[in-house]
Structures are given as structure tokens and as C-alpha cells.
């Protein structure tokens, strides 16, 4: 492809991203519509952030990595925002401590919304400037960073929902975020295990199209034959584990998890289950509801997923096994666009590989062979977190559908369970 064709391709992609930028910024505000003023500043735990901070940080990303380097004669909205709303990019300054984000009563929500409008206007004007007189030497980088910023905001849309849920779900009032109560789930099919005999396979994102740096390079992996469950584990099935004393059986648990159980740092049921007058309920974003035995279990951590799998005589998939299993399927399922904000029961013919819950794998989050992080400060996006975490796959009911690919690698510490995380079983042949 010659230089003119390359530039023309970049211009077309920038025009597409112009529409994508507007859509993602509006979606974030739409997700905030059920909130009231008092909700915006609450930080219910150190790992969660207030909605107000998410609104500002996603703007800070475009402000820092697009407007500051490329907008001519750029004057920032407020110089202190560079510190207040920096998450973890040490290459551009010292971030404000994560655990203290809820202490920021100022700037006000009104001021942060004004900041968003300021950034939106600046990005729109800059895109128009690039489209009117495309700078050949900068177009490809502009496209790369703008696309990354859009994907970054989609990640924070999911985080906004999970953080709000942690706040509401630990409030004795159990307020509902979603005003429409979900209908009861339908009984799933009996769980079955399909035989898979892959051999030498390719995993990872192809060189073309958008993917995060941790999804590349595409490479070969040898997989032994295995068996994979045709659906997710349900609440009813996990309840049997609870009632069988699964949380009291040390042989099922990794040593670190067992220590947490004994110290009371891990409650002996999924995060939002509540036993009230002898009956199990679950907090969902439509409020506190009777536990729906037919829906997938959610908000279990990696330790719980492994213990449950051990209890059934099964195991978790590796991330390579998961990607090979899902790679031939269309990315369809219960994503945030359904506005259910909770895992759905199995629908006819669905294996629930995409959407509903992030599926824990047994794979540690580490670089692929030949991995190269992004250049400059944006290299801090993924690579520096490749330590002590597990990979999750598939997306959830809080994830934008456009955001997910079969190669997508999410990652959390095995003790984390405030995200929409669940379980799929596998077995050896």
C-alpha cells in the first residue's frame, strides 16, 4: 500500500472514530442518568471509584493524550486536573492516591460535566482540523490514540456500573439502579461437556484491526484434548456447593484463599448473596431480589471458581482453551446494550461464551511470546500489570458488545469479585 492509500485509509478510519467518539461519550452520560447527586462522590472501597471520578478520568485521557500534544496553542481546563484524574500513568505525573478519590468533594459534579464538554469540543475541533488538512506524518498515531481512548471509556462504563453496584449493594436500603425488575430466569439445559481435540492452534489478535497490546502477537499454542461445559454455572448449582459445606472444606481451596476464609476476609457466599430469615436473596441492579436459581452465578472470585470446580471434579479452562472454543462463534449475548445489568439464564442454543459474566480462567496474566507494549507513556496501559493476576474472558452484562473480541484479555487478582465474574467448567479427557 502506497503512502496516498495509507493516508486515505487513515482518513476514513478517523471519520468512523469521529462518530464513535460522540457515541461513547453520550453512552457514559446515559449510564449516569439513574444516579442522583449524592451518588456521584461515593467511593465504597479502595478498588472502586466514584462516578464523578470516572466522568473526569475518561475526559482526562483525551485531554492528556490527544488535546495536549496536538491541539494548537492548547490551554488546559484546569492545571490541577492533571494530577487529580490521572489513574496510574507515572510518565505524565504523580497520580492522586486511588484510595482517596472519594475525598474529593471538589471539583463539583457541575464543574466536571463542564470539563467533559470542554474536552468534547476540543476533540471534535481537532478531528475536524485533521480531516480538513490531513497531516500525513501524524494521522496514523492520531487514529491509534483516539481509538484507544474510545475503548478506554468503554472499559470505564463497565467499571462505573460495577462500582455503583458495590455502593448500592452494601447499603441496607438496597436501592435499585434499574427501575425495571427482571423477569424470572428460565430453567437451563442440563450441563453437558463437549469433547474438543484441538492440537496446535493460533491464539491472539491478528495484526490488522484494533486490539489492546496484551492481545498480541498472534502465536501458536499446543492444546491437549479437553472437555468444555456447554453453559455457565448457575446460582442453583453454586447453592448446592454452599449447602454442602464447600466453604468449610480445606481440600478444595488454594492456601491463600483458605487463609482468607479463616481470617474472615472472604465471606462464605458470593458477594451479593444475603441470607435473610432463612431465605437466600441477591442484590442486583434492579434491587434486592429472591435468589434466581436459573441465572448464572456472578460476583465470585477466582478462588471460589477454582474451589467450586474442584468440588465438581472439574477445573477451569485455560485462556487458550477458552479462546479456541469461542473463536469460531459470533460475539453475541447479553451485554450492556440489553439494559438488564445482570446475567441472563441460558437461551436456546446459546453456550453463553460472550456476555453475561467474565469467565475466570486458570491462566496467569503474562505477556505473550514476542509481546511489545505501546510506545511512550501509553505503554503503561497494560504491560505493567502482568503480575499476580488471572485472565478472564468473554465480557459481561455490563460490557459494551462492540468492545469484546474472542482474543480480549481481561485480568483481575484472584481475590477480586466486585466485577461481573462467573464460572465455566472444563474437564480433562
Image (cartoon, rainbow, N blue to C red):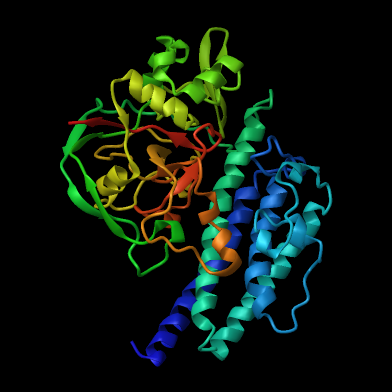
Q: Nearer the viewer, residue 368 or 108?
A: 368
Residue 23 visible (yes or no): no
Would you say 144 lies left or right of 240 here?
Answer: right
At which x and y percent is residue 179?
59, 37
Please identify the residue farthest to the top as the structure is shown: 278
Q: Say if 204 sits above or below 252 in the image.
A: below
At which x and y percent is residue 246?
42, 14
Q: Say if 53 sits above or below 378 in the image.
A: above
Q: Nearer the viewer, residue 96 or 373?
A: 373
At which x and y percent is residue 121?
68, 73
Q: Say if 229 sits above or below 410 in the image.
A: above
The number of callouts visible is 0
Please identify the residue farthest to the right as the structure is shown: 106
Would you say 406 lies left or right of 146 here?
Answer: left
Residue found at x 38% / y 68% = 209
Residue found at x 77% / y 40% = 38
Residue found at x 73% / y 69% = 118
Residue found at x 80% / y 59% = 111
Residue 100 visible (yes or no): yes
Would you say 385 lies left or right of 321 here?
Answer: right
Q: Say if 56 sits above or below 426 in the image.
A: below
The image quadrant where one finds the C terminus is top left
Amino acid at each position: 500500500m502506497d503512502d496516498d492509500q495509507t493516508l486515505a485509509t487513515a482518513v476514513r478510519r478517523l471519520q468512523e472514530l469521529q462518530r464513535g467518539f460522540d457515541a461513547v461519550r453520550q453512552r457514559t452520560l446515559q449510564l449516569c442518568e439513574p444516579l442522583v447527586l449524592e451518588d456521584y462522590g461515593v467511593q465504597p472501597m479502595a478498588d472502586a471509584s466514584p462516578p464523578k471520578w470516572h466522568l473526569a478520568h475518561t475526559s482526562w485521557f483525551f485531554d492528556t493524550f490527544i488535546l495536549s500534544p496536538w491541539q494548537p496553542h492548547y490551554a488546559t481546563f484546569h492545571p490541577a486536573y492533571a494530577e487529580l484524574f490521572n489513574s496510574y500513568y507515572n510518565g505524565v505525573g504523580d497520580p492522586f492516591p486511588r484510595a482517596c478519590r472519594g475525598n474529593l468533594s471538589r471539583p463539583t459534579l457541575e464543574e466536571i460535566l463542564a470539563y467533559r464538554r470542554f474536552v468534547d469540543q476540543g476533540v471534535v475541533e481537532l478531528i475536524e482540523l485533521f480531516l480538513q488538512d490531513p497531516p500525513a506524518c501524524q494521522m496514523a498515531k492520531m487514529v491509534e490514540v483516539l481509538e484507544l481512548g474510545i475503548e478506554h471509556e468503554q472499559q470505564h462504563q463497565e467499571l462505573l456500573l460495577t462500582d455503583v453496584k458495590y455502593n448500592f449493594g452494601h447499603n441496607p436500603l438496597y436501592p435499585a439502579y434499574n427501575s425495571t425488575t427482571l423477569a424470572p430466569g428460565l430453567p437451563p439445559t442440563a450441563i453437558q461437556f463437549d469433547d474438543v481435540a484441538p492440537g496446535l492452534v493460533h491464539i491472539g489478535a491478528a495484526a490488522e484491526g484494533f486490539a489492546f497490546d496484551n492481545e498480541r502477537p498472534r502465536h501458536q499454542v499446543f492444546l491437549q484434548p479437553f472437555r468444555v461445559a456447554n453453559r455457565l454455572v448457575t446460582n442453583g448449582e453454586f447453592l448446592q456447593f454452599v449447602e454442602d459445606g464447600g466453604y468449610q472444606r480445606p481440600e478444595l481451596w488454594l492456601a491463600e484463599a483458605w487463609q482468607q476464609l479463616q481470617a474472615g476476609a472472604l465471606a462464605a457466599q458470593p458477594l451479593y448473596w444475603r441470607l435473610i430469615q432463612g431465605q437466600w436473596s441477591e442484590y442486583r441492579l434492579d434491587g434486592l431480589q429472591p435468589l434466581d436459581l436459573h441465572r448464572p452465578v456472578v460476583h465470585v472470585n477466582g478462588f471460589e471458581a477454582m474451589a467450586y470446580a474442584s468440588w465438581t471434579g472439574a477445573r477451569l479452562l485455560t485462556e487458550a482453551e477458552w479462546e479456541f472454543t469461542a473463536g469460531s462463534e459470533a460475539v453475541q449475548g447479553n451485554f450492556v446494550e440489553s439494559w438488564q445489568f445482570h446475567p441472563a439464564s441460558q437461551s436456546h442454543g446459546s453456550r453463553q461464551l460472550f456476555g453475561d459474566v467474565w469467565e475466570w480462567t486458570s491462566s496467569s496474566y503474562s505477556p505473550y511470546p514476542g509481546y511489545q507494549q505501546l510506545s511512550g507513556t501509553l505503554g503503561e496501559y497494560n504491560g505493567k500489570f502482568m503480575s499476580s493476576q488471572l485472565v478472564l474472558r468473554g465480557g459481561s452484562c455490563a460490557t459494551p458488545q462492540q468492545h469484546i473480541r474472542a482474543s480480549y484479555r481481561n485480568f483481575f487478582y484472584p481475590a477480586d469479585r466486585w466485577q461481573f465474574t462467573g464460572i465455566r467448567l472444563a474437564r480433562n479427557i
